[in-house]
Amino acid sequence: MQLSRFTDYTLRVLFYVAANNDRLVTLSEIAGYFDISVEHLRKVVHALSKSGHLATFRGKNGGIKLAVDATEINLAVVVAQTEGKEPLIDCSKQGCRLTGSCSLQGILDRAQAQFMAVLEEYTLADLIKSPTMRQQLLLKAV
């Protein structure tokens, strides 16, 4: 299983904003830190704003910050919002000759559910709790 680049960027934005939540953070700041296109991040921030995870402020002194406490941002919820809840494979849509006799779909469904169950155990606050990670996220982009 592989998470999409959008999910990767979503998590990076949340890490950075959470570690720097004592101030407004800009898109260009995050883009420079992670060496990611501002345009990619604009879409990520828009989605995070719509989902209620980020608050955005326009204007000369604008930026972004968490809209809720990091303890309220569950990783499973974020991943489900960015990746969707589709099965890893959907044999019924593939027209597979083994549909009905193959057990792979059930195994993958179970694996996906366990993956999400592990993510449900953690919040954004859990991830940025590490002093080393927090210190790294507070460093300015080079």
Image: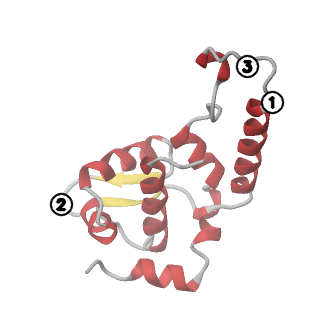
> What's the residue at 48%, 50% (across, down)?
7
Question: Could you tell me which secondary element the residue under label 3 belongs to?
Answer: loop
Mark in front: 2 vs 1: 1
Amino acid carrying label 1: it is: Ser
Q: Nearer the viewer, mark 3 or mark 2?
A: 3
Which residue is label 2 attached to? 60
The quadrant where residue 60 appears: bottom left
| Residue 51 percent across, percent down from the top left | 50, 42
Foreground of the two, 20 or 13: 13
x and y percentages locating residue 65 in the rendered image? 42, 61
Name the amino acid, label 3.
Answer: Leu
- First in sequence, mark 2 or 1: give its number: 2
Residue on which the image places disc 1: 103
Residue 131's place in the image compared with 24, above or below, is: below
Q: Position of residue 46 (x, y in %)?
A: 37, 44
Q: Quadrant of the C terminus?
A: bottom left
Instruction: Name the residue beneath numbered marker 3.
Output: 98
Q: Would you say 75 lies left or right of 16 here?
A: right
The alpha-carbon separation of the residues under discs 3 and 2 comes to 59 Å
Taking the spot 75% from the left edge, 45% from the top edge, the residue there is 111
Q: Secondary structure at mark 2?
A: loop
